[in-house]
Amino acid sequence: MNDIRPRWFIRNLESALRVLPVTVVTGARQTGKTTLVKSLGPSRAFFTLDEVGTLDQAERGPEALLSSPPVTLDEVQRAPSLLLAVKRAVDSRRHAGDFLLTGSAHLLLMGRVADTLAGRAIYLELPPFCPGEWLQRKDALTPLDRLFDPGFDFREWPTETGNWPAWLLRGGFPPALCIGADADRALWFSAYIQTYLERDLRQLSAVSSLPDFQRVMALAAQRSGRLLNQADIARDAGLPHATAHRYLNLLETGCLLTRIRPLATNPNVALVKTPKLLWTDCGLAAALAGIKTTADAVNRPDAGFWLEQTLFQTLQTWRAVDPMERKLHFWRDRPGHEVDFVLEQAGKLVALEIKTGSTVTSSDAAGIRAFRDSLKKNQKLVRGVVLHAGQPRPLDTGLLALPWGWMVAAG
């Protein structure tokens, strides 16, 4: 790929390197971690554990690799014991920015990690591109930020049309985004899945049956945007519950799956505590689910869930650019009232309900109203928003109908 695009995430990385001796950047394969860390310039020594010789040295005698900081070590999940050597190096000479590590797995979720580097490291996750970042729109996340402004004017909301099925198929991995034809991109995703199964997965854990694992991946993709029911996935895959549970955990460890946790509100309200399942990359999820064309996406009976999965690309980027202050939840009570996403920033909340159609009625905000009524006194809902395909307008006090088109703008 010749077209290297700047990442908004670079601000997080530069801030972390100024403060802590160890910065760990994780993310799925092909999100652009290596390109990102190399963009810091030639002053940092760079070693990748994808090279056999470097991997052997990291396992047998890592001290030499760490002897001349600042140093960047790429794909450290291949040698988890290396973290003990990093810890010793930090304890002997504590200096901000000395060690930058990348990995295609959540190191904190890996059972073989020897040390978490507590008090020495910060862990950051690089998500795939969202549409606005790929199109290099400088202020592409500003509309979400403005939702937290008490004086927000709905007439300032962007009203451009969008094409969510096209972005669903494209996803956010740079190599896939550079492929123009849907059929060619489908081939790339097929190769990505094969590489993950045959290489990355075997590095994380022993899996006795790759076909069983791929079946769990496909079943999990079909449930994108829904509550995670591991028993159902195990039953449909014909596997023991413990095996399906382990396979799903491996997908999360490999930064491919994300579990969105429900927001706890009033303890007197019966709430669903099961997490919601979403894929880190919507294009990968679509490929696993057998969605090959835009017509496939819009004609599915569960198209609303796939719109939600597509818009999640932007929401996870919004969270990732300020992970200390921003959080992403959903909400659902036992009677069935639900809010698709709850954005949290510095203790303030914004509720988002997502609709595929252009017509919004008062009943579409029923979940947001139930959520608002359930909040404790110390929880503040700034506003509720029904994101839809129509035009912006107020629905009620503190409730707005706003278009989602700008989040999947053509480009």
Image (cartoon, rainbow, N blue to C red):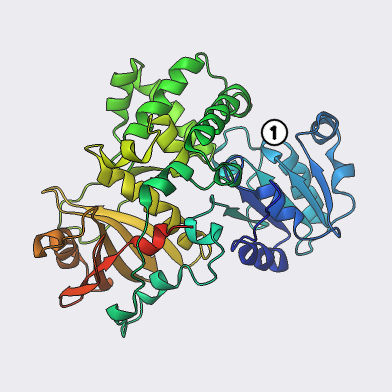
Q: Residues within 10 Å of mark 1 (few under 14, many from 20)?
A: many
Query: Can residue 322 be seen?
Result: yes
Q: Please state the horizontal and vertical placement of residue 45, each as a whole percent of the image.
A: 85, 52
Q: Secondary structure at mark 1?
A: helix
Q: Please state the horizontal and vertical placement of residue 36, each as a whole percent of the image.
A: 69, 54
From the viewer's side, name the closer residue of 226 and 313. Answer: 313
From the viewer's side, name the closer residue of 399 and 381. Answer: 399
**Mark 1 is on which residue type?**
Arg
Please name the residue shown 16% across and 78% down the image: 397
In the displayed structure, does residue 313 sit left or right of residue 32? left
Q: Splitting the image into 4 quarters, where does residue 354 fall? A: bottom left
Please determine whether, in this image, residue 147 is positioned above or below residue 351. Answer: below
Mark 1 highlights which residue?
78
From the viewer's side, name the closer residue of 153 and 219. Answer: 153
In the displayed structure, does residue 52 sit left or right of residue 346? right
Please name the residue shown 52% across and 48% down the image: 172
Q: Please state the horizontal and vertical placement of residue 399, each as a whole percent of the image.
A: 20, 72
